[in-house]
Image (cartoon, rainbow, N blue to C red):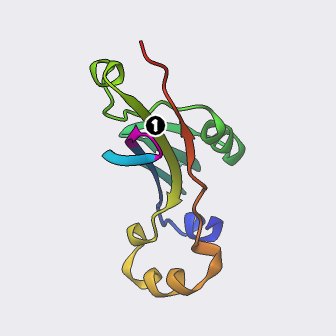
Amino acid sequence: MREALDSGVDLRLDVITRVERRIGPLRLPHEKQLHPVEIRFLPLTEQWQLSVDGAQRAFPRLWLLLDALAEPHTFRTGLTRAQLARGQWQVRARVRFNREALPAPMHLPALFSPDWRLAGRWHAWRPARS
């Protein structure tokens, strides 16, 4: 992936959030949202660029970009306070690498190489009622 970035290929991670209504042991899907996170290297200015849900930041060093990726971010889930007051809900989130966002010539190698199969595990929590 670092080689791809150095060659001018943009990388995209997708933060996926899911809201599920809990009824006993069942989880009923309610809303799913996708939040793009894009990483690119600009060789002429030697800057790293991070775009999270459309908000861009630039970094002069890779380690600063990596630190920014490790920072907590907030993402909209679509769950409202009114919904929260009327039932039990669970919010789940995960991050996955979006291979489909790569340029067409890279699709086949990314499909077969384990280096391009990056997906985090689902993290779940139950928001407290207001």
> Residue, x 37% and y 35% (percent of image)?
77
Say few, some or many: other residues with alpha carbon within 10 Å of mark 1 (under 14 / 14 to 19 / 20 or more). Answer: many
67 to 112, vertically: above or below: above
Residue 21 among those drawn in magenta: yes
Q: Secondary structure at mark 1?
A: strand
Q: Position of residue 91 (x, y in %)?
A: 46, 38
The N terminus - image quarter: bottom right
For residue 69, side relative to residue 58 (left or right): right
In the image, the segment drawn in magenta is 19-25
Q: Residue 31's quadrant in the figure?
A: top left
Q: Total label count?
A: 1
Farthest-out residue, top: 130
Q: In the rendered view, does 125 fall on the left or right side of 28?
A: right
Residue at 52% across / 38% down in the picture? 58
Picture layout, residue 10 above or below residue 122: below
Q: Quadrant of the C terminus?
A: top left
Between 37 and 91, which is closer to the camera in this rendering?
Answer: 91
The residue lying toward the viewer, choosing from 7 and 123, is: 123
Q: Nearer the viewer, residue 12 or 45?
A: 12
For the point 60% across and 56% down, which residue is it?
A: 120
Residue shown at 59%/31% (left/top)? 72
- Look at the magenta stretch and give its main secondary structure: strand
Q: Position of residue 24 (x, y in %)?
A: 44, 40
Which residue is tagged 1?
90
Q: Amino acid at mark 1?
A: Gln
Residue 88: where, in percent of width, then height?
41, 30
Q: From this viewpoint, is residue 35 visible?
A: no
- Seen as rendered, the residue at the extreme front is 24
Residue furthest right as drawn: 63
* Residue 60 sits above or below residue 114 on the image: above
Q: Is residue 11 visible?
A: yes
Q: Tell me the quarter of the picture where residue 64 sits.
A: top right
